[in-house]
Amino acid sequence: MRTVYVNGDYLPENEATVSIFDRGFLMADGVYEVTSVLGGKLIDFAGHMARLERSLAELDMPKPAAFDELPEIHRELVRANGVGDGLVYLQITRGSDGDRDFVFPDAETTEPTLVLFTQSKPGLADNPAARTGLKVISIDDLRWGRRDIKTVQLLYPSMGKMMAKAAGADDAWMIEDGLVTEGTSNNAYIVKGNTIITRHLGTEILHGITRAAVLRFAAEAQMQVEERAFTLEEAKAADEAFVTSASAFVMPVVEIDGTAVGAGTPGPVATRLRDIYIEESRRAAV
Ligand code: PLP
């Protein structure tokens, strides 16, 4: 039985409750973050907190009173649940003033809802999928236009994972106007020659915290990086492909729509970046 955090209280998971009128439940009016834990320490924590603050600001959603205590709340949950490797999930919603209405409730009188829980994932950094690589399919990107905000509206990405599963693949890359936006829950990259190519930042993709770190490490290792949109055809003809996310780190992609990428096995660039990312992140973990 896990200890979870809800609105100021640490509780056993089966005693934690949120109102049925909560706007997160009724309207998907909420934002979230997922921070990985390795060796009991938080990975890229400052980045996740900075993006959380931005998501709240973009949606004009008030910060919960406990916002400044978030580092301590994360650490306490990791400690209370004995998490070695795993993750901390955090969600903030606009709360509820006790009824359903499209209009935002008065921020002066309505406290946002703050929920955190942990998931233990022993061996998170040693995922066997990193040795075989992922198979992805391409699907239309049917999400809303503000994908840079990390909202809990995850129905379409969830459907994308189901489409992948039905096709015998591991995940899906989303396509808009012939260009790859990103994976259902990760940023997408290809490697052509010596160049790493990943979509530029904008409202079309989530600004991955892992993406920012990986591009920094790539530059430090003198690798060439191009931040631009790429087509599905370019991806299929690339030497390598990979994805990044907080919980998967750097994960090679070896097949797109049944076409092998490069040699059809994890490539040297993805493998090297994965090693560097995990090593450097462990070093900087808090
Ligand atoms: N893109 C999408 C759509 C995501 O859902 C995620 C993570 O959940 C990412 C990219 C990767 O972001 P991060 O590296 O911050 O986990």
Image (tube, rainbow, N blue to C red):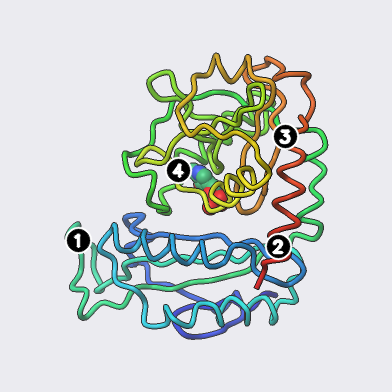
Q: Where is residue 121 in the image (x, y as percent from the top left)?
A: 74, 59
Task: Please tell me which residue lies in front, 59 or 211.
Answer: 211
Position above or below: 103 against 2 = above
Helix, strand, or loop for circle 4? helix
From the image, tell me which residue sits under label 3.
Answer: 269
Q: Which of marks 1 and 4 is nearer the N terminus?
A: 1
The residue most toward the front is 222
* Left or right: 96, with 82 as reference point: left
| Residue type beneath disc 4 | Leu
Question: Can you tell which of label 3 and label 1 is closer to the viewer?
Answer: 3
- The label nearer to you, 2 versus 1, is 2
Asked if the residue under mark 4 is in contact with the one under mark 1, i.e. CB atoms within 8 Å, the reply is no
Which comes sooner in the sequence, label 4 or label 3?
4
- What amino acid is at disc 3? Val
Most foreground residue, 110 or 122:
122
Q: Whole-Å distance between the Cαs marked 2 and 3?
A: 25 Å
At label 1, the amino acid type is Asp
Query: Residue placed at 26% from the left, 77% from the top?
Result: 110
Using residue 181 as the reference point, say whether residue 44 is left or right of it: right
Secondary structure at badge 2 equals strand
Q: In which quarter of the image is residue 145?
A: top left
Residue that label 4 marks: 155
| Residue at left offset 17%, top offset 60% | 103
Viewer-side label of 1, 4: 4
Towards the viewer: 3 or 190: 190
Is tag 3's residue or tag 1's residue first in the polypeptide sequence?
A: 1
In the rendering, which numbered label is found on residue 101? 1
Give neighbour class at mark 3: few <14, some 14-19, many 20+ (Cα, 10 Å).
many
Q: What residue type is labelled 2?
A: Gly
